[in-house]
Amino acid sequence: MARILSIDYGGKRTGLAVTDPLQIIATGLTTVETPKLFQFLKAYFAKEPVELILMGEPKNWDDSDTHATPLVKKAVERLKKEFPTIPIKMWDERYTSKMASQAMIDMGLKKKQRQNKALVDEIAATIMLQEYLRSIS
């Protein structure tokens, strides 16, 4: 089986998480600077089979679009053009950053470590992917 890749897309940074090849466990992959995302993905897809991209969909609590929604939609269009063979599924990413911050507290990370926004983005992508895996099992 191929992996599922989760993307927590942001204007500055993008958090990435992947499943194991059996699609049982979600693990943080990395955080990349958003302008370097597609370069990173090309290299990653060349060495790892990915059967689905799970893209975080930013929504407000009332289901309206956020300020980040147009950025994500633009990124999805580019993903479809550059990687036409890999399907993309949108996934509600509400509260994943808050959940990531809480997870960092629960792990006992010091305040300085918790301020690492790149780590927050990677953990948010992992939480999103774990929620998706739970929904399909």
Image (spheres, grey):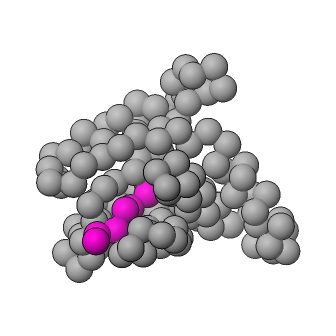
Left or right of residue 33: residue 75: left
8 is higher (above) or lower (below) than 114: above
State which region is magenta: 1-8
> Where residue 47 sits in the image (x, y, percent)?
23, 80
Q: Indicate whether residue 4 is drawn in magenta.
A: yes
Left or right of residue 46: residue 26: right
Q: Which one is in front, 58 or 21?
A: 21
> Where residue 136 sits in the image (x, y, percent)?
46, 51
> Where residue 48 sits in the image (x, y, percent)?
27, 76
The quarter of the image holding the N terminus is bottom left
Number of marks drawn: 0
> Where residue 36 sits in the image (x, y, percent)?
34, 63
Q: Specify the farthest residue to the front.
A: 137
Asked if residue 75 can be seen in this view, the reply is no
Q: Indicate whether residue 3 is drawn in magenta.
A: yes
Residue at 14% from the left image edge and 50% from the top image edge: 84
81 is higher (above) or lower (below) than 37: above
Asked if residue 60 can be seen in this view, the reply is yes
Q: Which one is in front, 136 or 31?
A: 136
Q: Quadrant of residue 46?
A: bottom left
Q: Specify the farthest residue to the bottom.
A: 47
Residue at 66% from the left image edge and 26% from the top image edge: 61
Residue at 47% from the left image edge and 42% from the top image edge: 91
Residue at 47% from the left image edge and 65% from the top image edge: 17
Q: What secondary structure predominates along the stretch shown in magenta? A: strand
Left or right of residue 89: residue 87: left
